[in-house]
Amino acid sequence: MRTAVFSTKSYDRQFLAPAAEAAGHEMEWFEPRLSRATCPLARGFSAICTFVNDALDATILQAIHEGGTRFVALRCAGFNQVDLAMAGQLGIQVARVPTYSPYAVAEHSVGLMLALNRKLYKAYNRVREGNFSLEQLLGFDLRGKTVGIFGTGQIGTVAARILHGFGCRLLLVDIHENDACRAMGTYVSREQLIAESDIITLHCPLLPQTHHLIDDRAIDQMKPGVMLINTSRGALIDTRAVINGLKSSRIAYLGLDVYEEEADLFFEDLSGDVIQDDVFARLLTFPNVLITAHQAFFTSNALTEIARVTMVNVTAFAEGQPLTNAVTVDLLKK
Ligand code: NAD
């Protein structure tokens, strides 16, 4: 099947091209993100393949439907960027890669915790400049600290295992509890997790119910000096509220791999440009904020699995088989 691949980077081609060849599919590589301006590129392709910041709102879905597209293969797990009701109405099928490597994302989340706590990003620069002072590098032992894990699905469960291994006390929140996590920690209310955690890490999907779950009110209830980690989706956090929390020192450490307005920034080299997003620019001024540009998934293991499952999805669509990884409005109700 001929498939238009949007937001193509060198690493996408490196992993998707051999998987497509093995599955007998032809890929057409497009570098731009899918947007109102670029959706004409999809014309004539019954299948397209998109990533996290490709827009699939109602207008774009209608436009690509007119151009003949009937299938969207998301090469990611999250699907908050898709207007699923409109896709359903138009008869555009959507599939995703629900699991590729929960280890990649959980390990990156813990990496942010360690780097922030021990200020590795500062230490690296200092030592390279011949500054061997330890002033302001003081950290704390993770052992015995209370970590709140919001969302104990695949990634949250791996994070729980790692942190349990460190000897942390785990407080958990999920609408579906699981036994593996119950054996390592305690399911509590959202309020208790927020009030008692030294470190809060977010691993639930972005849904209307979880949009800005970390807002002014939640931050007011947090322990002074809390560490907040978000590798899930940017809009779980109200960034302006978090900036106020950093200014008041209620939040003492912030680790982000995602940002609510990341679509205009992440995945591109903008090092020669002036950043126009003043909220993001303010975040970069804090000495206790560590931001990575949506790279938590970025391991060779994860990209191999994403390519494999994406081709399974394209093949199922091409052959008119049921889509085992279908994304429909019903998923929003789970
Ligand atoms: P998952 O579906 O296995 O787990 C999500 C968990 O959140 C589930 O247990 C679910 O019950 C829970 N949940 C849903 N709504 C909730 C609510 N209102 N309150 C509390 N819990 C709720 O998903 P996963 O594979 O663990 O991925 C989690 C998220 O990580 C994804 O949605 C995605 O946004 C993000 N992600 C980020 C990257 C990255 O590179 N930064 C990569 C992959 C996934």
Image (cartoon, helix red, strand yellow):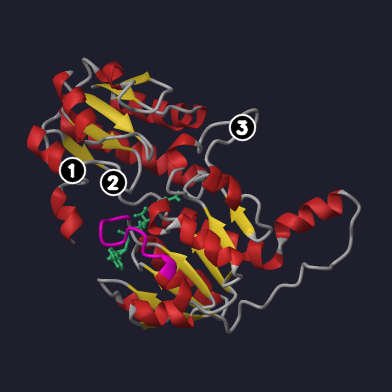
Return the disc, 1 or 2, that comes first in the chain's sequence. Answer: 2
Compared to residue 105, the image places residue 55 above or below, namely above
Callout 1 amino acid: Leu
Compared to residue 163, the image places residue 111 above or below, namely above
Q: Find disc 1 in the rendering and name its residue.
A: 84
Compared to residue 239, the image places residue 96 above or below, namely above
- Which range is magenta? 206-216
Q: Find disc 2 in the rendering and name its residue.
A: 79
Marks 1,2: beta carbons within 8 A: yes
Which secondary structure lies at badge 2? loop
> Where on the picture, by quarter, is residue 139?
bottom right
Residue in the picture at 40% in, 68% down: 157
Say if residue 66 shows up in the picture. Answer: yes
Callout 3 amino acid: Val
Left or right of 148 in this view: 287: right
Q: Assess whether residue 60 is covered by the magenta stretch.
A: no
Label 3 near ligand 1 (CB < 8 Å): no
> Where on the picture, by quarter, is residue 16?
top left
Question: How far is disc 3 from disc 2 in space, using C-alphas?
Answer: 30 Å
Which secondary structure lies at badge 3? loop
Mark 3 vs mark 2: in front: 3
Question: How far is disc 1 from disc 2 in space, using C-alphas?
Answer: 9 Å
Ligand 1: image quarter? bottom left
